[in-house]
Image: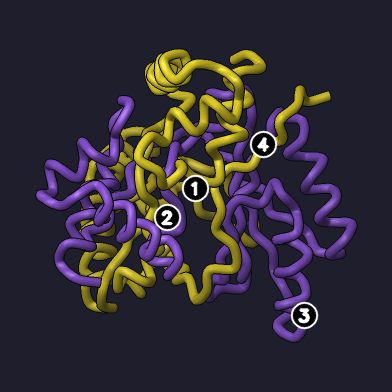
Amino acid sequence: MDDIDRTIINRLQEGFPICPAPYQRVAETLNISEQELLERLQILLDSGILSRFGPMFHAEHMGGALTLAALKVPEDNYDTIAETINAFPEVAHNYARKHLLNMWFVLATETPVQIQQVITQIETQTKLTVYNMPKIQEYFVGLKLEA
Amino acid sequence: MDQIDRAIISASQAGLPLTPEPYQSLAEQIGISTDELMQRLIHMQEQGIIRRIGAIPNHYKLGYKHNGMTVWDIEDAYIDELGKKIGALDFVSHCYHRPRHLPDWPYNLFAMVHGKSAAAAELQIQQIADLLGDHCRAHEVLYSTRILKKTGLRIKNNVPS
Protein backbone atom coordinates (compact mmCIF):
# COMPACT_ATOMS: atom_id res chain seq x y z
CA MET A 1 0.00 0.00 0.00
CA ASP A 2 1.49 3.33 -1.06
CA ASP A 3 0.41 6.96 -0.73
CA ILE A 4 -1.90 6.75 -3.74
CA ASP A 5 -3.68 3.74 -2.21
CA ARG A 6 -4.04 5.63 1.07
CA THR A 7 -5.52 8.62 -0.72
CA ILE A 8 -7.95 6.35 -2.57
CA ILE A 9 -9.07 4.67 0.66
CA ASN A 10 -9.55 7.98 2.45
CA ARG A 11 -11.34 9.58 -0.47
CA LEU A 12 -13.68 6.64 -1.08
CA GLN A 13 -14.75 6.44 2.57
CA GLU A 14 -16.29 9.88 2.11
CA GLY A 15 -18.62 8.74 -0.62
CA PHE A 16 -18.84 8.03 -4.32
CA PRO A 17 -20.69 10.03 -6.97
CA ILE A 18 -23.79 8.90 -8.81
CA CYS A 19 -23.12 9.78 -12.45
CA PRO A 20 -22.48 7.83 -15.68
CA ALA A 21 -18.67 7.62 -15.24
CA PRO A 22 -18.05 7.96 -11.49
CA TYR A 23 -14.60 6.30 -11.42
CA GLN A 24 -13.44 8.74 -14.09
CA ARG A 25 -14.67 11.66 -11.98
CA VAL A 26 -12.96 10.41 -8.81
CA ALA A 27 -9.75 9.56 -10.70
CA GLU A 28 -9.54 13.15 -11.96
CA THR A 29 -9.63 14.54 -8.43
CA LEU A 30 -6.83 12.14 -7.49
CA ASN A 31 -4.71 12.95 -10.56
CA ILE A 32 -4.58 9.35 -11.71
CA SER A 33 -6.16 7.60 -14.67
CA GLU A 34 -9.50 5.84 -14.41
CA GLN A 35 -7.73 2.62 -15.37
CA GLU A 36 -5.25 2.99 -12.50
CA LEU A 37 -8.02 3.71 -9.99
CA LEU A 38 -9.93 0.58 -11.08
CA GLU A 39 -6.80 -1.60 -10.92
CA ARG A 40 -5.80 -0.31 -7.51
CA LEU A 41 -9.35 -0.75 -6.17
CA GLN A 42 -9.36 -4.34 -7.39
CA ILE A 43 -6.07 -5.03 -5.60
CA LEU A 44 -7.27 -3.35 -2.38
CA LEU A 45 -10.38 -5.53 -2.45
CA ASP A 46 -8.52 -8.74 -3.38
CA SER A 47 -5.97 -8.21 -0.59
CA GLY A 48 -8.76 -7.55 1.91
CA ILE A 49 -7.56 -4.04 2.79
CA LEU A 50 -11.03 -2.99 1.71
CA SER A 51 -13.73 -5.37 2.87
CA ARG A 52 -16.26 -3.84 0.52
CA PHE A 53 -16.89 -1.08 -1.94
CA GLY A 54 -20.44 -0.07 -2.74
CA PRO A 55 -23.66 1.18 -1.20
CA MET A 56 -24.14 0.84 2.55
CA PHE A 57 -27.75 0.11 3.30
CA HIS A 58 -29.68 1.11 6.39
CA ALA A 59 -31.69 -1.95 7.35
CA GLU A 60 -34.32 -0.15 9.40
CA HIS A 61 -35.04 2.37 6.66
CA MET A 62 -35.66 -0.56 4.32
CA GLY A 63 -38.27 -1.96 6.68
CA GLY A 64 -35.80 -4.47 8.05
CA ALA A 65 -34.14 -4.77 11.42
CA LEU A 66 -30.69 -4.96 12.98
CA THR A 67 -29.46 -6.08 16.31
CA LEU A 68 -26.22 -6.69 18.16
CA ALA A 69 -26.05 -10.00 19.97
CA ALA A 70 -23.49 -11.76 22.11
CA LEU A 71 -22.70 -15.30 23.23
CA LYS A 72 -20.62 -16.93 25.95
CA VAL A 73 -18.86 -19.58 23.88
CA PRO A 74 -16.79 -22.36 25.51
CA GLU A 75 -13.21 -21.97 24.20
CA ASP A 76 -12.83 -25.57 22.97
CA ASN A 77 -15.95 -25.19 20.86
CA TYR A 78 -15.23 -21.72 19.64
CA ASP A 79 -14.47 -22.31 15.95
CA THR A 80 -17.35 -24.73 15.47
CA ILE A 81 -19.79 -22.25 16.99
CA ALA A 82 -18.34 -19.47 14.83
CA GLU A 83 -18.99 -21.59 11.74
CA THR A 84 -22.55 -22.25 12.83
CA ILE A 85 -23.20 -18.56 13.44
CA ASN A 86 -21.49 -17.39 10.24
CA ALA A 87 -23.53 -19.81 8.15
CA PHE A 88 -26.62 -17.68 8.83
CA PRO A 89 -26.95 -15.19 5.93
CA GLU A 90 -28.52 -12.79 8.44
CA VAL A 91 -25.19 -12.53 10.29
CA ALA A 92 -23.53 -9.46 8.76
CA HIS A 93 -20.51 -9.20 11.09
CA ASN A 94 -19.07 -11.42 13.75
CA TYR A 95 -16.20 -10.55 16.08
CA ALA A 96 -14.25 -12.45 18.68
CA ARG A 97 -13.79 -10.28 21.77
CA LYS A 98 -11.87 -10.73 24.98
CA HIS A 99 -14.62 -11.11 27.59
CA LEU A 100 -16.85 -13.72 29.20
CA LEU A 101 -19.23 -12.74 26.39
CA ASN A 102 -16.63 -13.64 23.76
CA MET A 103 -18.55 -13.65 20.47
CA TRP A 104 -20.39 -10.57 19.19
CA PHE A 105 -22.38 -10.51 15.99
CA VAL A 106 -24.74 -8.23 14.12
CA LEU A 107 -27.96 -9.66 12.71
CA ALA A 108 -29.66 -7.93 9.80
CA THR A 109 -33.05 -9.19 8.70
CA GLU A 110 -35.66 -8.06 6.23
CA THR A 111 -38.42 -7.78 8.81
CA PRO A 112 -38.31 -7.10 12.58
CA VAL A 113 -40.02 -10.39 13.40
CA GLN A 114 -37.20 -12.36 11.76
CA ILE A 115 -34.69 -11.16 14.37
CA GLN A 116 -36.31 -13.25 17.06
CA GLN A 117 -36.73 -16.19 14.67
CA VAL A 118 -33.01 -16.20 13.85
CA ILE A 119 -32.09 -15.84 17.53
CA THR A 120 -34.26 -18.84 18.35
CA GLN A 121 -32.61 -20.86 15.58
CA ILE A 122 -29.16 -19.88 16.82
CA GLU A 123 -30.05 -20.85 20.39
CA THR A 124 -31.39 -24.20 19.20
CA GLN A 125 -28.36 -24.98 17.04
CA THR A 126 -25.69 -23.80 19.50
CA LYS A 127 -27.47 -24.62 22.78
CA LEU A 128 -26.22 -21.26 24.06
CA THR A 129 -28.14 -18.24 25.31
CA VAL A 130 -28.13 -15.27 22.95
CA TYR A 131 -27.81 -11.90 24.69
CA ASN A 132 -29.87 -9.69 22.41
CA MET A 133 -28.93 -6.02 22.54
CA PRO A 134 -30.98 -4.10 19.97
CA LYS A 135 -30.33 -0.39 19.82
CA ILE A 136 -32.62 1.81 21.87
CA GLN A 137 -31.07 4.99 20.52
CA GLU A 138 -28.35 5.72 17.94
CA TYR A 139 -26.11 8.67 18.81
CA PHE A 140 -23.58 8.35 16.01
CA VAL A 141 -22.58 6.08 13.14
CA GLY A 142 -19.87 7.29 10.82
CA LEU A 143 -16.80 5.19 10.52
CA LYS A 144 -13.88 6.87 8.82
CA LEU A 145 -10.44 5.46 9.44
CA GLU A 146 -7.43 7.36 8.16
CA ALA A 147 -5.37 4.99 6.00
CA MET B 1 -39.37 0.59 -1.70
CA ASP B 2 -40.70 -1.44 -4.56
CA GLN B 3 -39.50 -4.53 -6.42
CA ILE B 4 -37.06 -2.53 -8.56
CA ASP B 5 -35.48 -0.95 -5.48
CA ARG B 6 -35.14 -4.41 -3.99
CA ALA B 7 -33.53 -5.66 -7.18
CA ILE B 8 -31.07 -2.75 -7.03
CA ILE B 9 -30.14 -3.63 -3.45
CA SER B 10 -29.81 -7.27 -4.32
CA ALA B 11 -27.57 -6.54 -7.33
CA SER B 12 -25.30 -4.10 -5.50
CA GLN B 13 -25.04 -5.47 -1.97
CA ALA B 14 -21.90 -7.45 -2.75
CA GLY B 15 -20.32 -4.30 -4.15
CA LEU B 16 -20.30 -1.90 -7.06
CA PRO B 17 -18.93 -3.28 -10.35
CA LEU B 18 -15.33 -2.23 -11.05
CA THR B 19 -16.04 -1.15 -14.59
CA PRO B 20 -15.96 2.37 -16.07
CA GLU B 21 -19.76 2.57 -16.06
CA PRO B 22 -20.81 0.65 -12.95
CA TYR B 23 -24.35 2.01 -12.81
CA GLN B 24 -24.93 1.04 -16.42
CA SER B 25 -23.81 -2.52 -15.62
CA LEU B 26 -26.22 -2.69 -12.67
CA ALA B 27 -29.05 -1.22 -14.75
CA GLU B 28 -28.52 -3.82 -17.48
CA GLN B 29 -28.54 -6.59 -14.91
CA ILE B 30 -31.88 -5.36 -13.55
CA GLY B 31 -33.37 -4.42 -16.91
CA ILE B 32 -33.93 -0.69 -16.37
CA SER B 33 -32.26 2.38 -17.87
CA THR B 34 -29.09 3.83 -16.35
CA ASP B 35 -30.95 7.09 -15.70
CA GLU B 36 -33.67 5.35 -13.76
CA LEU B 37 -31.10 3.42 -11.74
CA MET B 38 -29.22 6.60 -10.82
CA GLN B 39 -32.45 8.45 -9.94
CA ARG B 40 -33.47 5.61 -7.69
CA LEU B 41 -30.07 5.50 -5.98
CA ILE B 42 -30.26 9.25 -5.34
CA HIS B 43 -33.78 8.83 -3.97
CA MET B 44 -32.71 5.95 -1.71
CA GLN B 45 -29.85 8.11 -0.40
CA GLU B 46 -32.31 10.93 0.37
CA GLN B 47 -34.59 8.50 2.19
CA GLY B 48 -31.67 7.13 4.20
CA ILE B 49 -32.08 3.63 2.77
CA ILE B 50 -28.53 4.07 1.49
CA ARG B 51 -26.33 5.65 4.16
CA ARG B 52 -23.65 6.35 1.56
CA ILE B 53 -21.84 4.71 -1.32
CA GLY B 54 -18.22 4.13 -0.45
CA ALA B 55 -15.36 1.99 0.72
CA ILE B 56 -15.28 -0.03 3.92
CA PRO B 57 -11.73 -0.75 5.02
CA ASN B 58 -10.67 -3.68 7.12
CA HIS B 59 -9.44 -1.73 10.14
CA TYR B 60 -6.85 -4.36 11.09
CA LYS B 61 -5.21 -4.08 7.68
CA LEU B 62 -5.00 -0.30 8.03
CA GLY B 63 -3.04 -0.77 11.25
CA TYR B 64 -5.93 -0.24 13.68
CA LYS B 65 -5.23 -3.29 15.79
CA HIS B 66 -6.72 -1.98 19.01
CA ASN B 67 -10.44 -1.89 18.36
CA GLY B 68 -12.28 -1.48 21.58
CA MET B 69 -15.98 -1.77 22.18
CA THR B 70 -16.25 0.42 25.26
CA VAL B 71 -19.34 -0.21 27.37
CA TRP B 72 -20.58 1.97 30.22
CA ASP B 73 -23.20 1.74 32.94
CA ILE B 74 -24.86 5.16 32.83
CA GLU B 75 -27.65 6.49 35.02
CA ASP B 76 -30.77 6.26 32.85
CA ALA B 77 -31.67 9.91 33.39
CA TYR B 78 -28.43 11.01 31.71
CA ILE B 79 -28.06 8.45 28.93
CA ASP B 80 -29.31 10.61 26.02
CA GLU B 81 -27.41 13.73 27.05
CA LEU B 82 -24.18 11.79 27.57
CA GLY B 83 -24.67 9.52 24.56
CA LYS B 84 -24.82 12.55 22.26
CA LYS B 85 -21.62 13.94 23.79
CA ILE B 86 -19.75 10.68 23.36
CA GLY B 87 -21.09 10.20 19.82
CA ALA B 88 -19.76 13.65 18.92
CA LEU B 89 -16.14 12.70 19.77
CA ASP B 90 -14.22 12.48 16.51
CA PHE B 91 -12.60 9.13 17.32
CA VAL B 92 -15.87 7.34 18.16
CA SER B 93 -17.17 5.44 15.12
CA HIS B 94 -20.44 4.08 16.54
CA CYS B 95 -22.34 5.08 19.68
CA TYR B 96 -25.57 3.49 20.90
CA HIS B 97 -27.90 3.13 23.86
CA ARG B 98 -28.61 -0.60 24.27
CA PRO B 99 -30.44 -2.64 26.92
CA ARG B 100 -28.79 -4.06 30.02
CA HIS B 101 -28.95 -7.80 30.79
CA LEU B 102 -28.73 -7.93 34.57
CA PRO B 103 -26.95 -9.33 36.44
CA ASP B 104 -24.36 -10.35 33.78
CA TRP B 105 -24.42 -7.23 31.70
CA PRO B 106 -25.05 -3.89 33.44
CA TYR B 107 -23.88 -1.68 30.54
CA ASN B 108 -26.25 0.52 28.53
CA LEU B 109 -23.94 2.84 26.54
CA PHE B 110 -21.73 1.45 23.76
CA ALA B 111 -18.99 3.40 21.96
CA MET B 112 -16.46 1.96 19.50
CA VAL B 113 -12.90 3.31 19.48
CA HIS B 114 -10.05 2.40 17.14
CA GLY B 115 -6.36 2.87 17.91
CA LYS B 116 -3.15 2.02 16.11
CA SER B 117 -1.53 1.43 19.50
CA ALA B 118 -2.79 0.32 22.89
CA ALA B 119 -1.78 3.71 24.26
CA ALA B 120 -3.82 5.55 21.62
CA ALA B 121 -6.91 3.49 22.45
CA GLU B 122 -6.37 4.00 26.20
CA LEU B 123 -6.17 7.74 25.71
CA GLN B 124 -9.50 7.72 23.86
CA ILE B 125 -11.11 5.63 26.59
CA GLN B 126 -9.83 8.01 29.27
CA GLN B 127 -11.38 10.95 27.39
CA ILE B 128 -14.74 9.17 27.38
CA ALA B 129 -14.43 8.37 31.09
CA ASP B 130 -13.63 12.01 31.85
CA LEU B 131 -16.69 13.21 29.94
CA LEU B 132 -19.00 10.73 31.66
CA GLY B 133 -17.67 11.58 35.12
CA ASP B 134 -19.81 10.57 38.08
CA HIS B 135 -22.79 9.56 35.92
CA CYS B 136 -20.93 6.38 34.98
CA ARG B 137 -21.02 3.61 37.58
CA ALA B 138 -18.80 1.06 35.83
CA HIS B 139 -17.24 0.35 32.48
CA GLU B 140 -15.35 -2.26 30.50
CA VAL B 141 -13.52 -2.39 27.20
CA LEU B 142 -13.96 -5.43 24.97
CA TYR B 143 -11.13 -5.60 22.47
CA SER B 144 -11.72 -7.58 19.31
CA THR B 145 -9.23 -10.36 18.76
CA ARG B 146 -10.46 -11.63 15.39
CA ILE B 147 -12.89 -10.78 12.65
CA LEU B 148 -14.94 -13.95 12.24
CA LYS B 149 -17.17 -12.55 9.51
CA LYS B 150 -17.63 -9.22 7.80
CA THR B 151 -20.04 -8.83 4.93
CA GLY B 152 -22.54 -6.19 4.02
CA LEU B 153 -26.23 -6.62 4.32
CA ARG B 154 -27.60 -9.57 2.38
CA ILE B 155 -31.16 -9.59 1.19
CA LYS B 156 -32.76 -12.05 -1.11
CA ASN B 157 -34.28 -10.74 -4.28
CA ASN B 158 -37.87 -11.56 -3.39
CA VAL B 159 -40.69 -10.32 -1.22
CA PRO B 160 -40.41 -11.44 2.40
CA SER B 161 -43.18 -13.82 3.33
For mark 4, give the secondary structure.
loop
Q: Does residue B15 sit above or below B50 in this rendering? A: below
Q: CA distance from mark 3 to mark 1?
A: 29 Å
Q: Disc 3 sits on a residue from what chain?
A: A
Q: Which mark is residue B72?
A: 2
Disc nearest the viewer among 3 and 4: 4
- Is disc 3 in the same subunit as disc 1? no
For mark 1, give the secondary structure.
loop
Q: Dot 3: within a 10 Å radius of its alpha carbon, few (fewer than 14), some, or many (20 or more) residues?
A: few
Q: Where is residue A102 drawn, in percent x and y? A: 61, 71
Q: Is residue A7 left or right of residue B125?
A: left
Q: Nearer the viewer, residue B150 or A75?
A: B150
Residue at 84%, 24% in the rendered image: B161
Q: Nearer the viewer, residue A25 or A91?
A: A25
Q: Which mark is residue B155?
A: 4
| Residue, disc 1 | B108
Q: Is residue A84 left or right of residue A141?
A: right
Q: Nearer the viewer, residue B19 or A145?
A: B19
Q: Dot 1: within a 10 Å radius of its alpha carbon, few (fewer than 14), some, or many (20 or more) residues?
A: many
Q: Which chain is yellow?
A: B
For mark 3, give the secondary structure.
helix
Q: Where is residue A136 drawn, in percent x and y? A: 53, 34
| Residue, disc 3 | A77
| Quarter placement of the N terminus of chain A | bottom left
Q: Is residue B134 visible?
A: yes
Q: Colour of chain A?
A: purple
Amino acid type assigned to the residue bearing label 3 in the image: Asn
Are the two marked residues, 4 and 2, in contact with CB atoms closer than 8 angstroms? no
Residue at 20%, 36% in the rendered image: A25
Q: Is residue A104 left or right of residue A73?
A: left
